[in-house]
Image (tube, helix red, strand yellow):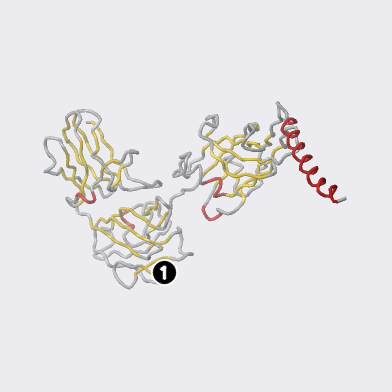
């Protein structure tokens, strides 16, 4: 009896090993892929008129859709993992992103899960506020050692929201912009947080706010949430403070940190183009003209030879000079290099700091 007790666990291990080997042998060489069904469009975020899911940040945790499919069949009873993939329509999933996974072929996704990989700062770079088409499919897999199978493709339309943060700046200076004074929903007076971390930056014309412009900050386009006003000092803001009135009339670069409750404002009296071109020689600036209507800064009639470069400086300060990063973005970061001219000729250089409906700045080189 004692020997039998020892033998029984050993026999069980042998049977388990045999079953595992049999499972490997029983996997079908032609497994059945999951069949992805047409989305049900039951979410309130689905717009039947445009045929698109209209996403918004306030509903980030809400379920926007549940994508369902018939089960995959690998010819053996082993746990199957189902993964929802997405890519731009017609891209054949060359740049596919995995959104979510489940042990069943019914995958519910939230607004944030759908928005993050496709929005303008996401990997698929779809402009926020614009309806774009995307292909989705379900990948079924039973382990890293086995080739996954893929469902058919369904195409959906999505209108994403920005993955960067917005900070609205209502005040009495807004008559300098279309949209009216003390209007937190004015889309032309916004600061941006590219990292969506509560630190915001932007340039605003406050010359129409009188001798001391009055304004506040709010992370929503309304007065129904916390709005930030004057703090204990000129560099502090408060969720219970009154109007900020610490600046003089003018054009400003604003930096605001909501987590730290701080702000800084740099008065900019001029922008200048400086570079290797003959009229400058990296010593003389060609001053730019500000258009109070378009909010653009321009310098005209600059003659460049082939291969010449330039930067754009505020207040003759190299520390805040605009250049270009390796990714093509125009910034004032410490990693920027000189901006190259495409070809020899006479140019109008335009500095666009408006960020209307988009994060980032732009330097436009127009050959005359």
Crowding at mark 1 (Cα within 10 Å: few <14, some 14-19, many 20+): some
Residue positioned 16% across, 29% down in the render: 305
Per the image, label 1 sits on a secondary structure element best described as loop
Q: Quadrant of the C terminus?
A: top left
On the image, the x and y values in percent for residue 201 come to: 34, 54
Please, which residue is most extreme toward the right here? Answer: 1
Q: Is residue 233 left or right of residue 19?
A: left
Q: Is residue 191 left or right of residue 247?
A: right
On the image, the x and y values in percent for residue 33 come to: 69, 32
Residue 300's place in the image compared with 314, above or below, is above
- Along the line of sight, the residue nearer the viewer: 80 or 213: 80
On the image, the x and y values in percent for residue 190 come to: 38, 54
Residue positioned 50% across, 42% down in the render: 118
Please, which residue is most extreme toward the bottom here? Answer: 232
- Along the line of sight, the residue nearer the viewer: 331 or 300: 331
Q: Is residue 16 left or right of residue 89?
A: right
On the image, the x and y values in percent for residue 191 come to: 37, 54
Please, which residue is most extreme toward the top here? Answer: 29
- Along the line of sight, the residue nearer the viewer: 199 or 315: 199
Provide the residue designation for mark 1. 239
For residue 217, what is the image quadrant? Answer: bottom left
Residue positioned 35% across, 60% down in the render: 256
């Amino acid at each position: 009896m004692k020997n039998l007790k020892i033998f029984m666990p050993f026999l069980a291990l042998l049977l388990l090993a045999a079953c595992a080997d049999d499972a490997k042998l029983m996997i079908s060489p032609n497994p059945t892929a999951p069949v992805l069904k047409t989305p049900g469009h039951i979410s309130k975020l689905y717009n039947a008129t445009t045929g698109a899911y209209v996403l918004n940040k306030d509903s980030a945790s809400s379920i926007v859709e549940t994508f369902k499919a018939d089960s995959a069949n690998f010819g053996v009873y082993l746990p199957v993992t189902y993964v929802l993939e997405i890519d731009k329509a017609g891209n054949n999933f060359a740049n596919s992103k995995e959104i979510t996974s489940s042990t069943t072929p019914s995958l519910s996704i939230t607004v944030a899960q759908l928005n993050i990989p496709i929005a303008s700062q996401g990997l698929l770079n779809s402009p926020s506020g614009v309806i774009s088409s995307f292909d989705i499919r379900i990948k079924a897999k039973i382990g890293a050692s086995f080739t996954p199978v893929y469902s058919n493709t369904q195409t959906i339309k999505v209108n994403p929201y920005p993955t960067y943060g917005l900070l609205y700046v209502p005040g009495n200076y807004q008559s300098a912009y279309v949209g009216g004074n003390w209007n937190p929903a004015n889309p032309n007076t916004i600061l941006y947080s590219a990292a969506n971390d509560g630190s915001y930056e932007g340039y605003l014309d406050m010359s129409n706010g009188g001798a001391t412009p009055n304004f506040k900050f709010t992370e929503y386009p309304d007065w129904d949430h916390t709005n930030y006003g004057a703090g204990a000092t000129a560099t502090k803001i408060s969720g219970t403070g009154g109007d900020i009135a610490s600046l003089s009339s003018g054009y400003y670069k604003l930096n605001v940190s909501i987590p730290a409750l701080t702000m800084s404002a740099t008065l900019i009296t001029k922008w200048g183009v400086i570079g290797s071109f003959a009229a400058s020689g990296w010593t003389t600036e060609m001053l730019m003209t500000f258009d109070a209507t378009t909010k653009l800064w321009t310098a005209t009639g600059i003659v460049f030879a082939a291969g010449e470069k330039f930067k754009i400086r505020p207040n003759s300060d190299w520390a805040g000079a605009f250049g270009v990063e390796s990714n093509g973005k125009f910034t004032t970061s410490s990693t920027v290099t000189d901006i190259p001219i495409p070809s020899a000729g006479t140019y109008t250089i335009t500095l666009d700091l408006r960020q209307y409906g988009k994060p980032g700045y732009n330097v436009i080189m127009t050959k005359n």
